[in-house]
Image (cartoon, grey):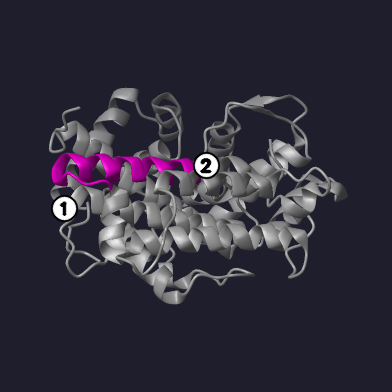
């Protein structure tokens, strides 16, 4: 997800580019809030549809989409208290990358490079739900202020969660070793 | 320039880059698995709006077309770069510093993301160029580490491993610059912008 500072309103090329560039990140963000894959997809689609209906320009559309999708998910699932929602993580295994239409890299190439991705994603999945949410939102380009607003915490808590998550990952030696192929 | 590669700031930078690469790879996989035209159709339907017809990029990567030829040139360039980096990262006699190997592996992962994204025509120009620039940055970092710790350049390291088997011509920086130009060309055809652009430029 790129935290875009552009102004988006209505449909057309800009909207569709925004959709293609950020739809997956939005789905992942809602999933980390405790949604199933299906719920996250639904909330993301709804948020994009609402953005399309706006008659006024939106600055920072990704922040707006995250907030709208998260609210939609919470409204649709009032029986699950937000603080008790179990974070569900289903990273797509690298070996399940569908074959592109042309000139696909070999399965061996994908598997070899995918291993490093898998290690990092596995370690991220082992973090606490809040730390993972903050981390993913941070690396997806949202500001500390935006993350704080979205997750209902202070900016100090955002920084603290980021710091603790990094410390945990360093302890778990997420960085690759030289002898890893 | 003095390198202090073991400082905590540097470790954080490396960790950040590694995590960002993994998360971006996950997004690339999600993108590749998703049917965007169907998704857009659903969004417009939910909004109760008709989708503008002109914004759907046409699929014109069929063999024999100019677009396909340009795309193949990018793929072949990616394959060539990846092959060169692979010999450094997978050599049995590898004595490269750990951090340089890490940068090279990340560069290869970004090359793969670039190839998959362009193949699936789901990579915006900005993200494609960002990937190329990140690859170039990783190669510069690798070169600096090798020079500081082993007194050789990345170009020398590649040559030392492939020997006389292959002439790689110019250095890797030039190769990444050429890749950038070829990727840009995919997005900037004035005659048929839709057919050449995976996603229209902002």
Question: Would you name the residue on which mark 1 appears?
Answer: A172
Asked if labels 2 and 1 share a chain, the reply is: yes
B148 part of magenta stretch: yes
Is residue A57 rendered to the left or right of residue A115?
A: right
Residue in the foreground of this view, choosing between A12 and B190: B190
Measured as percent of width and height from the top left, residue B46 is found at 75, 49
- Mark 2 falls on what kind of element? helix
Q: Position of residue B24 (x, y in %)?
A: 44, 50
Are the two marked residues, 2 and 1, in contact with CB atoms closer than 8 angstroms?
A: no
Give the residue displayed 34% in from the left and 63% down from the top. B86
View extreme (bottom): residue: A107
Q: Foreground: B95 or A76?
A: B95
| Image quadrant where one finds the N terminus of chain B | top left
| In the image, residue B188 above or below residue A108 | above
Specify start and end residues of the magenta stretch as a single range.
B131-153
Tell me: A87 left or right of A166.
right
**Position of residue A80 measured from the top left corner of the image (x, y, whole percent):** 44, 50
The residue that appears at 69% across and 39% down in the rendered structure is: B201
**Disc 2 sits on a residue from what chain?**
A
Circle 2 is placed at which residue position? A70
Q: Is residue A170 left or right of residue B31?
A: left
**Is B136 in the magenta?**
yes
Q: Position of residue A97 (x, y in %)?
A: 50, 69
In the depicted view, which residue is nearer to us: B83 or B22?
Answer: B83
Q: Chain of mark 1?
A: A
Q: Residues within 10 Å of mark 1 (few under 14, many from 20)?
A: few
* Image vertical order of residue A13 relative to residue B26, above or below: above
Residue sitting at x 58%, y 26%? A5
**Residue B64 in view (yes/no):** yes
């Amino acid at each position: 997800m790129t935290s875009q500072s552009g102004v988006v309103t209505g449909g057309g090329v800009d909207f569709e580019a925004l959709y293609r560039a950020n739809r997956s990140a939005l789905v992942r963000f809602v999933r980390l809030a405790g949604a199933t894959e299906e719920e996250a997809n639904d909330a993301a689609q709804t948020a994009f549809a609402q953005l399309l209906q706006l008659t006024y320009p939106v600055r920072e559309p990704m922040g707006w989409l995250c907030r709208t999708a998260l609210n939609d998910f919470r409204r649709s699932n009032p029986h699950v208290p937000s603080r008790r929602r179990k974070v569900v993580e289903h990273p797509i295994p690298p070996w399940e990358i569908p074959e592109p239409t042309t000139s696909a890299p070999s399965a061996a190439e994908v598997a070899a490079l995918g291993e490093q991705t898998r290690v990092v994603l596995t370690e991220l999945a082992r973090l606490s739900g809040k730390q993972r949410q903050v981390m993913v939102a941070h690396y997806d380009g949202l500001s500390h202020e935006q993350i704080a607003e979205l997750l209902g915490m202070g900016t100090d808590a955002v920084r603290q969660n980021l710091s603790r998550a990094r410390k945990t990952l360093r302890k778990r030696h997420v960085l690759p070793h030289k002898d890893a192929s | 320039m003095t390198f202090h590669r073991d400082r905590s700031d540097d470790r954080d930078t490396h960790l950040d880059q590694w995590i960002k690469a993994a998360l971006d790879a996950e997004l690339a996989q999600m993108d590749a698995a998703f049917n965007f035209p169907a998704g857009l159709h659903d969004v417009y339907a939910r909004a109760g709006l008709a989708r503008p017809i002109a914004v759907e990029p046409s699929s014109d990567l069929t063999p024999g077309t100019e677009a396909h030829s340009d795309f193949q040139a990018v793929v072949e360039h990616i394959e060539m770069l990846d092959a060169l980096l692979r010999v450094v990262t997978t050599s049995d006699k590898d004595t490269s510093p750990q951090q340089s190997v890490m940068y090279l592996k990340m560069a290869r992962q970004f090359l793969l993301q670039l190839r998959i994204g362009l193949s699936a025509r789901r990579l915006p120009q900005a993200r494609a160029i960002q990937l190329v620039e990140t690859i170039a940055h990783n190669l510069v970092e690798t070169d600096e580490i090798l020079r500081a710790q082993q007194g050789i350049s990345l170009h020398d390291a590649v040559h030392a491993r492939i020997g006389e088997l292959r002439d790689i011509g110019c250095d890797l920086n030039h190769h990444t610059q050429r890749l950038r130009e070829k990727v840009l060309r995919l997005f900037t055809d004035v005659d048929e912008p839709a057919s050449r652009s995976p996603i229209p430029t902002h």
